[in-house]
C-alpha cells in the first residue's frame, strides 16, 4: 500500500520516501522503524498519525507524522496491546476510533484515539467477539456500521458502532454467511454506503452484499469472478 500525503509517500515495505513533483523522482530514502513485522499500515483520516498492526508481537504501533520532514516518531505509550495475531487496522471516518481484528483471537480490539496525541485507549467491552481467523474490518462511510471478515468461518460479523463510545453491538442476523465465496480476506463499502464488496481469496471471487441503510444488515446479491488469489480491494468514486 502506498499512501500519498502532500509531497510524502508512506509505503508498506517499511520506508519513507520524499517525492519531488517537479523532478518526478524520489530521494532521501530512510527506514521506517520496524521492530516486528507489520501486515498493514494506515493513515488517520486527518493525516496526523500512522497505525501498524504487528502480527507477531500482538501489538499496535502508532506514529505521529512530522508535517515538515515526514519523520514518524512513536506516540507516547506505543506500541499498544492487542489480541492474538492482529492482522490489519481500520480507522473510522471521524478518526476517533480504531479497530483491529485478531486472527487467532476470534475477536476485534477497539480503541479510542486521542485527537491531539494519537494515544490509544481501550473501548469498554473490547475485545469484541468475531469468527474464526478475523481478518479485516470494513467500516461504513457514515461510521455507523463495522463489518469483520472471518476467513475460516466464511462469514461476516456485522456490528453497529456507538457514535459516542465506539462500542460494537451485533446486528440482528449476524454473522452473515458468505454463501458464494471461500475465505473472505478483504472488503470495502462503496462511497454511498449501499453496497459491501468482499474479496474471497480461495474462490477467486468478489461477493456483493446490499446494506440496509437503517439496520446495517446484509443481503447477498451474488458474486463475480476475479483473477487467481485476490487479497485486496480498493474502490474509487
Image (spheres, rainbow, N blue to C red):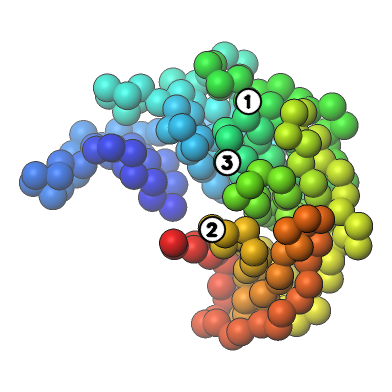
Name the spot of residue 76 as percent of width and height, x first: 57, 14
> How many neighbours does mark 2 have within 10 angstroms: few (below 14), some (14-19), or many (20 or more)?
few
Distance (Cα) linking label 3 and label 1: 12 Å
Q: Residue at x 76, y 41 (%)?
A: 161
- 202 or 175: nearer the eye? 175
Nearer-N-terminus badge (2/3): 3
Residue 214, above or below 108: below
Marks 3 and 1: CB-CB under 8 Å? no
Give the CA distance from mark 1 to mark 2.
23 Å
> Residue 149, how many percent across, how many down?
73, 59
Mark 3, Cα crowd under 10 Å, few <14 / some 14-19 / many 20+, is some
Q: Nearer the viewer, residue 126 or 139?
A: 139
Side (left or right) of 93 relative to 31: right
Q: Judging from the image, what secondary structure is the residue with disc 2 in?
A: loop
Q: Is residue 153 above or below residue 90?
A: below
Separation of residues labelled 2 and 3 (CA atoms): 11 Å
User: Which numbered circle lies on residue 113?
Assistant: 1
Chain-order first, disc 3 or disc 1: 3
Residue on which disc 2 sits: 191
Can residue 15 be seen here?
yes
| Residue 202 visible in the displayed image | no
| Residue shown at 53% from the left, 31% from the top | 35
Q: Earlier in the sequence, mark 1 or mark 2?
A: 1
Amino acid at each position: 500500500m502506498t499512501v500519498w500525503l502532500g509531497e510524502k509517500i508512506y509505503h508498506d515495505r517499511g520506508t519513507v520516501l520524499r517525492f519531488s513533483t517537479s523532478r518526478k523522482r524520489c530521494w532521501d530514502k530512510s527506514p521506517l522503524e520496524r521492530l516486528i513485522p507489520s501486515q498493514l499500515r494506515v493513515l488517520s483520516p486527518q493525516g496526523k498519525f500512522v497505525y501498524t498492526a504487528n502480527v507477531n508481537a500482538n501489538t499496535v504501533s502508532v506514529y505521529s507524522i512530522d508535517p515538515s520532514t515526514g519523520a514518524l516518531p512513536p506516540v507516547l505509550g506505543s506500541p499498544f496491546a492487542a489480541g492474538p495475531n492482529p492482522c490489519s487496522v481500520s480507522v473510522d471516518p471521524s478518526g476517533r476510533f480504531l479497530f483491529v481484528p485478531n486472527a487467532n483471537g476470534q475477536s476485534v480490539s477497539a480503541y479510542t484515539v486521542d485527537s491531539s496525541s494519537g494515544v490509544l485507549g481501550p473501548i469498554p467491552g473490547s475485545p469484541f467477539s468475531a469468527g474464526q481467523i478475523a481478518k479485516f474490518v470494513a467500516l461504513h462511510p457514515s461510521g455507523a456500521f463495522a463489518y469483520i471478515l472471518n476467513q475460516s468461518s466464511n462469514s461476516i460479523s456485522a456490528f453497529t458502532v456507538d457514535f459516542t463510545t465506539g462500542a460494537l453491538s451485533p446486528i440482528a442476523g449476524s454473522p452473515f454467511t458468505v454463501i458464494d465465496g471461500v475465505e473472505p480476506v478483504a472488503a470495502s463499502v462503496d462511497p454511498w454506503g449501499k453496497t459491501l464488496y468482499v474479496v474471497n481469496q480461495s474462490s477467486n471471487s468478489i461477493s456483493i452484499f446490499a446494506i440496509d441503510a437503517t439496520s446495517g444488515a446484509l443481503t447477498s446479491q451474488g458474486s463475480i469472478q476475479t483473477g487467481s488469489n485476490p487479497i485486496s480491494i480498493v474502490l474509487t468514486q
